[in-house]
Amino acid sequence: MKKDNILIIGANGQIGSVLTQTLRSIYGHNNVIASDIRPKAEETGPFELINVLDRDRLNEVVEKYQINQIYHLAAILSAKGELNPLGTWDINMNGLFNILELAREKNIKKVFYPSSIAVFGPTTPPNQTPQDTVLTPTTVYGMSKVAGEYWTNYYFLKYGIDVRSVRYPGIIGYQSMPGGGTTDYAVDIFHEALKQQKFTSFLSEETELPMIYMEDAIRGTIELMNAPLEQVKIKTSYNLAAMSFTPKQIAAEIKKHIPSFEMTYAPDYRQAIADSWPNSIDDRIAREHWGWKEAFGLPEMVHDMLKNLR
Ligand code: SER
């Protein structure tokens, strides 16, 4: 077991709740401190209430547990962010600044900061989007992630803070629910397929987006965090890919397991966000640098989701 004391900010969210459990199984139950702005539904281990905009509170918790690694997951996502642009910028950017400054002052040796496919935009090459390419996001969330990538790189160059990051595609898992994202339909669809054998998609049937299964996302994140520093040459954020599909394709895959399943389409304001994002991602650099490789494609993911949700 490694002697690390880890703090997870945003531990009740879609990624955080699964990551907390996995990190506890690796580092020990009491060495992984969960935190969130809202209390947990049920207590499963050490937990602290933290608003990431509250510097004093962050200091207090880091000192209390002698934290030396932080996973900073708290953010407002793409769709919800559009309802309150300036508030989203405030939380996403000032939250990150608080973590970066904390890392500098308290000698935190490693930080994880998630970026997203939302850093790309309508003028980015949409197919097999390269690592180094045009970043023209049209959402506040995407703008905050682009700026965040540059700031984490800056803190590495200027202060040597080892911040590691991936540009997550849409994440699909049975363990938790996403909130406020544009890729959320790909999780909701499973719950509705099992409950009522039908689902109305808020994206049109041909909207192809990059996605990843939760197991792969969590494993990849921990592998990146444990890779030797010299392998982690990209200090902005790594492209990460596993699968790409359209609502029509995932519906067809679900129908193989639930023949009565029917899909209808009612695109809303999230369609424009999805249209501005890539169809597929070229993540060869992550594969070369630190050995990234997914285990789940679309059929494996659908099979595993339905098995676990049943
Ligand atoms: N899944 C996120 C969203 O849709 C992208 O990072 O906002």
Image: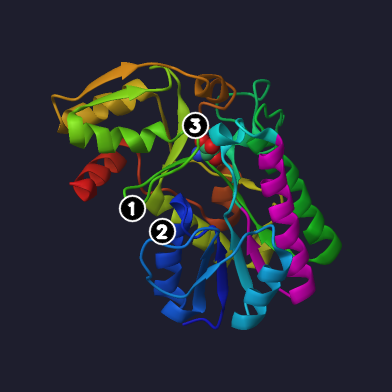
Taking 16 as reference, is 3 above or below it? below
Q: Which residue in the structure is indicated by mark 2?
A: 18
Q: CA distance from mark 2 to mark 3?
A: 20 Å
- Residue 160, image x and y in percent? 79, 66
Identity, as a three-letter code, of the amino acid under mark 2: Val
Ligand 1 has an atom within 8 Å of the beta carbon of the residue at disc 2: no
Circle number at residue 175: 1
Compare residues 288 and 181 and report the one nearer the observer.
181
Ligand 1 has an atom within 8 Å of the beta carbon of the residue at disc 3: yes
Residue shown at 59% from the left, 23% from the top: 276
Specify the segment rendered in magenta: 86-113
- Residue 269, image x and y in percent? 52, 20
Identity, as a three-letter code, of the amino acid under mark 1: Gln
Circle number at residue 182: 3
Residue shown at 67% from the left, 76% from the top: 60
Q: Name the quadrant containing residue 97.
A: bottom right
- Residue 56, image x and y in percent? 72, 70
Task: Please indicate, yes or no, whether residue 299 appears anywhere in the rendered image.
Answer: no
Residue shown at 19% from the left, 30% from the top: 196
- Which structural element holds mark 1? loop
Q: CA distance from mark 1 to mark 2?
A: 7 Å
Taking 92 as reference, is 189 above or below it? above
Taking 205 as reference, is 9 above or below it? below
Residue shown at 83% from the left, 65% from the top: 159
- Residue 277, image x and y in percent? 57, 27
Q: CA distance from mark 1 to mark 3?
A: 19 Å
Compare residues 291 and 170 and report the one nearer the observer.
170
Q: Are marks 1 and 2 in contact (CB under 8 Å)?
A: yes
Of mark 1 and mark 3, the one earlier in the sequence is 1
Let me know if residue 106 is in the magenta part.
yes
- Which structural element holds mark 2? helix
**Relative to residue 9, is residue 45 drawn left or right?**
left
